[in-house]
Image (spheres, rainbow, N blue to C red):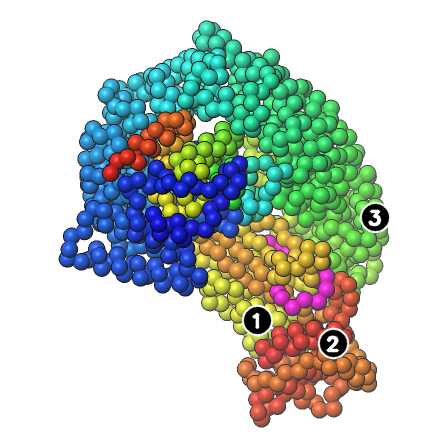
Amino acid sequence: MIRFILIQNRAGKTRLAKWYMQFDDDEKQKLIEEVHAVVTVRDAKHTNFVEVWDSLSLSFRNFKIIYRRYAGLYFCICVDVTDNNLAYLEAIHNFVEVLNEYFHNVCELDLVFNFYKVYTVVDEMFLAGEIRETSQTKVLKQLLMLQSLE
Amino acid sequence: RPMLSATRPQPQRVFSGTPGGQKPAKMPAVSKGDGMRGLAVFISDIRNCKSKEAEIKRINKELANIRSKFKGDKALDGYSKKKYVCKLLFIFLLGHDIDFGHMEAVNLLSSNKYTEKQIGYLFISVLVNSNSELIRLINNAIKNDLSSRNPTFMCLALHCIANVGSREMAEAFASEIPRILVAGDTMDSVKQSAALCLLRLYKTSPDLVLMGEWTSRVVHLLNDQHMGVVTAAISLITCLSQKNPDEFKTCVSLAVSRLSRIVSSASTDLQDYTYYFVPAPWLSCKLLRLLQCYPPPEDGAVKGRLVECLETILNKAQEPPKSKKVQHSNAKNAILFEAISLIIHYDSEPNLLVRACNQLGQFLQHRETNLRYLALESMCTLASSEFSHEAVKTHIETVINALKTERDVSVRQRAADLLYAMCDRSNAKQIVAEMLSYLETADYSIREEMVLKVAILAEKYAVDYSWYVDTILNLIRIAGDYVSEEVWYRVIQIVINRDDVQGYAAKTVFEALQAPACHENMVKVGGYILGEFGNLIAVVTVLFCHLAPCSSTFSQRPRRLSKRCCAMSWLVHLQQTVHNSDQYYVQTSEVVSPVPQATVLEEMPPFPERESSILAKLKKKKGPGAVSVTELEDGKREGGELNGGGERGPETASTPSPSADLLGIRSVAPVGASLSSAGSLLVDVFSEAGPAAPSAAVNDDGFLRFVCKNNGVLFENQLLQIGIKSEYRQNLGRMYLFYGNKTSVQFASFTTTVSCPGELQSHILCRPQLNVQSKPVEPLVEGGAQIQQVLNIECITDFSEAPLLNIKFRYGGALQNLTLKLPVTINKFFQPTEMASQDFFQRWKQLSQPQQEAQKIFKASHGMDTEVIKAKLLGLGMALLDNVDPNPENYVCAGVIQTKGQQVGCLLRLEPNAQAQMYRLTLRCSKDLVSRRLCELLAQQF
């Protein structure tokens, strides 16, 4: 199950934070900082999966971060340790392709100015910490339908 | 949106594949109809703010504006309300508190317009408020939307419930949602949302989601035409199956047939659900995962079909890829790894297990790090299956190579895990040797675990016990700090209970102790073993060499005692803790010079009542020390005996409690010599260790109180007390930190980190000034309990910044974060130097360069009592020299600071002026920065 989804830029600015578990505000802030700290130091020789060790934070014990970098943005999904790494890695890519299509060549600023729409995209594809819909065609069709509503 | 395009810098594409690609000039479709111009302007303004202050000012202006709009007489139209609520949301997401606007957001929920409703729901989902009045209104609006028969509104309402998932919402909707989910006329998209919404409610309030007629119909959603419905519903079914396997077991055959249809379909059959030529990868993974909730199907036909699916998946892995894109191989391999998980879960098909192993073996050498990592991880579980254990073992060389060459530490960690998992009697020596050599360079984060693994393997597969002893001693030599008490108690227990290894053990530890530097744990093990089986003369000499750096759990300063006495007290201590007998203590402490061979060091009978329960059990069955693999494993299962639990060994009694120590230290404190006359003085000096003010910032206050003393309370607030006890010798120091939980509630996630300021800025090739090593602490501190942490400190060169101790823990739900300056100051590494008047002034003159001297004139802040001043100067660590200064009112001190690289000579002169209540402090040191630093530290002490 997904614990949270984060989109951050290289400087650590959060572009999307979607939480699927109860965290208090302090915890959220701490998680955001830790994810940024562990993900930005990694390069292409590293895996796209991060286990965070106790020394950093105990709250990661049963979680792992699966992330993928696109230009200056890190898309991170935090899941249970037993979850399928590659399935979530591709779920990220699937999500990014939908964003790219929806925002016509998506860039970071699209996510800033249209933050409230990004939540809609997320809810179409992920819900309650699970994958809801995987078909790009279906998601985009639904998004365009919503777009046409007043 | 002219405003937007004017303020937009050149956007950076998320996809780097379209370099410099300009956005099309025409407005993107997404902006049609719903563009909130005011919001875009506001976001631009915020982005253009040059400083945090400017941003806050702009936000406050906006908040005032929104507040006045909400309070105004004129009723706001839906669009304005939406816009302002959305601005509030944006402000909240920037990290600012929002304390109004909730009601306006709730109002939006009852709008007929999608865009207004959407913003209302989004605000509610992000800023959940447990205000009961609002919850009632929100639930009312959700109820209306759920019964609206408008699929868009129904989805919005379901998403809100799924996102919030509160108990109140479960109470209101837990019975309604199953009905929507299985109703014949419900739209597909609504079914998807309803399934996952129900999953969320079931996870938060399982008692409120009652099984019923709907459950069997939910299982049949696996047959739904719409793959999206299956994808969503299967998550719900998997969760329900885990909790109620019998009720949902019909899902197995349905899942197998669905999987079979997907796996056998051509790469384009599933159209929308084909991802980079892979048919429905996510759904396949979910189906395979659902099957892992159950044992292999009993129905032969179903089982046959499933085995066929798994074989097809394994076959496809060998086919040439349909695309070179990584998305294709990832999607394909996601299914493959999930299939292998299922094969391992069943653990009944030798053929499939071996094929899986071979496939993973190929991945071990793949150029993609992700695949190597996942293959190592997956093989770890394969190694525990009797069918595939041998097949896994054939990859040993590749895995050892991975341990040595992988760049990503997590991959090396997986390799180490796999070596551990594939270890058996046939390869134990090779694997233990490789793990030991890896340990020398292993990341600190995994050393403790590695040490434990090596220790377990060494014991589990020991054929001859000399190999076991060698291994554990190597372990201590290589990673002594990470060898926990349990590990070294264990080697002692085993040696004591096996007479065939005792001679060898004594000889080996004796040799090991000849090394110029030994880890404290080596000295401890040596102490016990030689104490039992060694020769006395050798013991005293060899052990003594190592007593200094170890400094021990005694509070005595060894240099104040005679050598023999000190070494003897260590031995006495050993004997005492082994036997816990006062008699021995009396006997040996009386004998200082004559060698008390027979009495003190006569050989002990095998451990009487203090042996571990595993060994006791083994001995009953087979006689001492006959360790068999299965029984060790039994022991592990019963209570993790090998790694602690149960009997904690004899050492516990020797760890002094901090309170006892804080009192005990007085008799051996530097002022101890003038104890009789200074009874009240002691109280004065040490009572300063009063509670410090709680503070999240770095605590300087507590820090300064420790310049002239080594023990006391560093910090105290309502939750936590931190006591310190420290000892220094030459350029080495050891600090015991005692963390006391003052509450009755457990602290969770308790972590401490020590950092040296400046280490981040300094060039990585520069050596640190101070080297501080610590073992991690237990993550849980029970209410009322106290835990101890030891820091080993090495002064490499002179320094001015103290190390920082950061403590984080969870109390209740709240995260506590605290940073304290550790009282490690340069003066701690002083060796006092006695010298005559003539010498002193000669050296004083030699240190005459301006930068070698530091001087300060300051007002007395603590009264000018002679005894207090003397005590503080002694506490500083220098020698206080009498009859040196012609003026008897003045104080003169000399000392040498010991760093690893050099010695820094320091002379001090403190001239009090009682009339003016002033001091003049002068320091001259052979290194210029040191005089300045000492002067700063000391000027705040008097």
> Which of the 4 quarters of the picture holds residue B835?
bottom right
The chain letter for the residue carrying disc 3 is B
Amino acid on which disc 2 is placed: Cys
Q: In the image, what residue type sits under mark 3?
A: Asn
The subunit letter for the residue under badge 2 reads B
Membership of B632 in magenta stretch: no
Percent position of residue B886, x then y? 74, 91
Q: In this view of the protein, which residue sits in the foreground, B347 or B5?
A: B5
Q: Are marks 3 and 2 on the same chain?
A: yes
Q: Residues within 10 Å of mark 3 (few under 14, many from 20)?
A: some
Residue topped by disc 2: B925
Point 15% across, 55% down: residue: B74
Would you identify the image quadrant in which residue B706 lies?
Answer: bottom right
Displayed quadrant of residue B665: bottom right
Kindly identify which numbered label has been placed on residue A33. none
Judged left or right of residue B356, residue B280 is left
Q: Which residue is mark 3?
A: B535
The reply to whether the C-beta atoms of the residues labelled 2 and 1 are less than 8 Å apart is: no
Residue B773 shows in this picture: yes
Q: Residue at x 59, y 49 (%)?
A: B776
Q: Is residue B791 magenta?
A: yes
Q: Amino acid at mark 1?
A: Arg
Residue B705: mark in rendering? 1
Q: Are marks 2 and 1 on the same chain?
A: yes
Q: Chain of mark 1?
A: B
